[in-house]
Amino acid sequence: QSIRDGLKRVCWPARLQRLKSAEAFFETGAEIWLDGGHNDSAGLVLSRKLEEWKAQDEKPVHLVLGMITTKDPLEFVTPMLPYIDSVSVIPVKDEPLSHDPENVKAMLLNKDEGKKIDAYISWQDAVKGHAENDCRILIAGSIYMSGAILKDIGEVIL
């Protein structure tokens, strides 16, 4: 019974976590989602969710991407490309191993020249740059980044 009760209460932050407090702050009507996924397997799993969203209602999806240099942005993003409308590349806050957003932007432009790809200095600026009514913003690519964002919005779970 203890195991059943524990499983009912388990919380796994930054795994397709909807950031309703961030949505309220930006007041745009956009759904804002956070996922700590950062490798090719996570990209594949996220692509399935993006495909499901696309079939559900056709809302545009904007990816905000921050990764560290031990991970490959192309391996992560490639499965998601058919289902996203744009990519905003950001640095991972306070992380010396953060990929340079301009370098990742260039990599992604070489992979998909038709997709809108921008670089921003923060997740907040990226959200402001792409928030529109009736869209989804998925912030993903790093557990470090996810933790920093949860801290920024006061949703840190210790």
Image: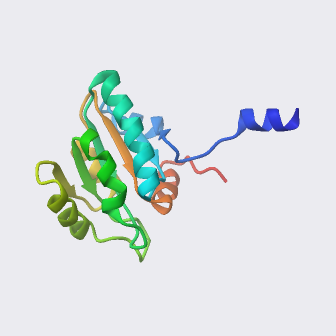
- In the rendered image, the vertical position of residue 59 relative to residue 15, given as above or below: above
- In the rendered image, the vertical position of residue 143 relative to residue 80, given as above or below: below
Residue 132 image-quadrant placement:
top left
Residue 142 image-quadrant placement:
bottom left
Residue at the (25%, 59%) spot, across then down? 120
How are the colours assigned in the image? rainbow
Which of these two is toward me, 152 or 3? Answer: 3
Please count the marks in the image.
0
Q: Is residue 153 left or right of residue 25?
A: right
Residue at the (16%, 59%) spot, across then down? 109
Residue at the (37%, 42%) spot, across then down? 47
Quarter of the figure that contains the C terminus? bottom right
Residue 31 is situated, as x and y percent measured from the top left of the image, at 37, 33
Residue 43 is situated, as x and y percent measured from the top left of the image, at 40, 51
Q: In this view, does 8 lie to the left or right of 57?
A: right
Quarter of the figure that contains the N terminus? top right
- In the rendered image, the vertical position of residue 150 relative to residue 105, given as above or below: above
Residue sitting farthest toward the bottom? 96
Residue 98 image-quadrant placement:
bottom left
Residue at the (32%, 46%) spot, across then down? 80
Residue 153 is situated, as x and y percent measured from the top left of the image, at 48, 48
Which of these two is toward me, 18 or 4? Answer: 4
